[in-house]
Amino acid sequence: MLKFLKNLKEDKYIKIAAILLFAAFFLGYTMRVLDFTKSPALSSIGVIYPIHQESYPHYMNSMIGYESSSSMRGGYDQISESPIDFLYVARNNIVSSVLIVFTGVLFAIPSIIFTFLTGLTAGQSIPEVLEFANGIIAAKTIFLFISYAFAIILATSIGIELGIALFKFIKEKKLQLKKTIYDKALLLIIITILNIILQYLLLVI
């Protein structure tokens, strides 16, 4: 276990993914604080940043007059008109992880873009939560973002590693995948399941 945690800490792909996600997060946060944007980018697409959709109904009434609150009326998202329930939470967490991992085979470019958009949208959402939500909802949202970010970082590291492995396979005709990628995949599954349960219990019920 200690060896596994040490490998995670030293994994260069995890470091790259973490830098990408949090650089995008701080960019989004800065844009929102300085009023370059009035609402989180792509927040209506649950798989980009589902936690924003889940927390929004808890404080949407306090935003009346600040910006349009029509995007979440009745607890539905703009894209699919699906109710925010357990299936919604499960779908968006699973789809986001699967997309990031398996689009890594396209030389990791979609994985990187998806992760950047996730960080950007999350960064633009947090100021809104801190300003309009009560302390309990804000604390829950931040805690769940940290947990969600861990899953995204794991998924991105796998996607990037797959993309690089494919590039080397095309170049050298030799496919090499380290054992750690399977360990990270298993951990990602566990974290994703925990995120689904926690998001549903803390923000949806």
Image (cartoon, grey):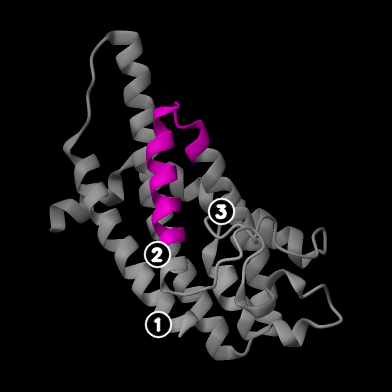
Disc nearest the viewer among 3 and 2: 2
Instruction: Name the one closer to the observer, 101 or 36.
Output: 101
Q: Which mark is residue 118?
A: 3
Relative placement, left or right, of 99 versus 64 is: left
Relative placement, left or right, of 196 versus 183 is: right
Name the residue at 25% across, 48% down: 184
Is disc 2 surrounded by few (<14), some (14 to 19) or many (20+) residues within 10 Å? some
Q: Amino acid at mark 1?
A: Leu
Q: CA distance from mark 1 to mark 2?
A: 12 Å
Name the residue at 38% across, 57% down: 151
Instruction: Name the one closer to the observer, 157 or 100.
Output: 100
Q: Which residue is mark 2?
A: 90
For mark 1, give the secondary structure.
Answer: helix
Q: Amino acid at mark 3?
A: Thr
Disc nearest the viewer among 3 and 1: 1
Q: CA distance from mark 3 to mark 2?
A: 17 Å
Q: Amino acid at mark 2?
A: Ala
Find out whether residue 108 is within the magenta segment: yes
Q: Which residue is mark 1?
A: 201
Q: CA distance from mark 3 to mark 1?
A: 22 Å
Find out whether residue 42 is within the magenta segment: no
Name the quarter where the N terminus is drawn. Answer: bottom left
Examine the residues drawn in magenta and state their main secondary structure: helix
Disc on the earlier residue, 3 or 1: 3
| Residue range of the region highlighted in magenta in the rendering | 91-111
Disc on the earlier residue, 1 or 2: 2
Residue 175 lies, with reference to residue 88, above or below; the image says above
